[in-house]
Amino acid sequence: MQVGIVGKPNVGKSTFFSAATMAPAEIADYPFTTIAPNRGVAYVRTECPCKSLGVKCDPHNSPCVDGVRLVPIEMLDVAGLVPDAWQGKGLGNRFLDDLRQADALINVIDVSGGTDPEGVPGKPGTHDPVQEVEFLRNEIVQWVNEILSNGFPKMARTAKMTGAKPEDVLRDRLVGLNLNDARIKASIAAADPPPDPTKWDADVLMRIAIKVREHGKPMVVAMNKADVAPPGNLERVSAVADMAFPVMAEAELALKKAAEAGLVRYRAGDATFEIIDESKMTQGQKNALGYIAKNMEKHGGTGVQRCLERAVFGLLDLIAVFPVEDENKYTDGQGRVLPDAFLVPRGSTAKDLAYKVHTELGDKFIRAVNARTKRTVGADHVLEDGDVIRIVADR
């Protein structure tokens, strides 16, 4: 799965990306620093079954730290978006094409109001951060609407003659946007268009585009630079956003670098950190850490990990499951205990998991075994968060 980092230039997108992934990204005070998209891997936390099962795990695709499994997700940091990007302004066409495969978006904004609509930095409080949320949503909606509208009448007439369902019409229109049938059907249900696609006028198509954005590219707002936000800005943005959290991306990046240098104890998502040895620090470093600690207490942490996990577990409603080949020892074919963690949509079945692991495993699925209960379950068995499952397939 892939999470896209979006927003206008110079609001801290690349800093957020670097803080989340610890991957290098060019960071500077001018628009369009990011030209080619940066790609990296971040991790979301979930409980590892090792403690409840009383075993020592041997992870393969996802590290385990004190019973907390770190499941990898791909992150994409794209070029900054400016108003009317959907019409090609700035790097708009490249930006939108880069986002086609994203499952969810994190909209990084400058909640301090210190960046103008074109991405030029200024003083906090000189711009309205609410507009950043509204314009980003509008750009994506306009992009989707353009995809829907281009040549739609001809396709609608064909669909009517062939008796195609509304979801078939949308699927053909939106191919390439990484939307599964569930998201397409949810968008249609929410938009409630006429059954006859030839009756879908401009207003209906725009209504569908809005719902496709909501269901197909759900968004968390990362209210970056929360530590210097004027009073009331966080509350006003939270009131218009679907889901928003205060964020201090620079603080997260600084803490991770300090932890790597052995100066502090800190893990992504912690609400606090611990200084290991003040004698190794300069006065400037001590002052900076004191400032970070004060603001972490105020906001409950840096917010970076919270945004990631709310996107994955909240917006996308994914759960973690653990496939094994031996339901008694919880091992794979190499003898590794609880080797892999997979993220799947809530409501997924045992057969869905089989296909997730390998196409051939899904094609030859016979049954599954719940390793916790040792019960045999069928293809339609609905998985629960933290399930350990053995897939039995025809050889």
Image (tube, rainbow, N blue to C red):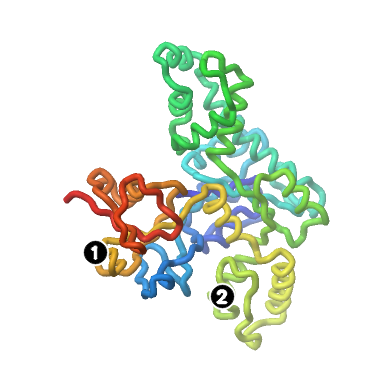
Query: What is the three-letter code of the residue carrying label 2?
Result: Ala
Quadrant housing residue 96:
top right
The answer to whether one can see residue 35 in this image is no
Residue wearing tag 2: 259
- Label whose residue precedes the other's in the sequence (1 or 2): 2
Mark yes or no: residue 110 visible: yes
Seen in the picture, residue 168 relative to 389 is either above or below; the reply is above
Residue at image mark 1: 333
User: With 163 as the anchor, is 311 left or right in this view?
Assistant: right
Q: Residue furthest left?
A: 395
Q: In the picture shown, does residue 12 fall above or below 263? A: above
Above or below for 384 versus 56: above
At label 1, which amino acid type do we have?
Gly
Q: In screen coordinates, is 91 left or right of 283? A: left
In the picture, the disc for residue 168 is none
What is the quadrant of residue 144 in the picture? top right
Residue 84 falls in image quadrant: top right
Query: Compared to 88, does 269 lie above or below?
Result: below
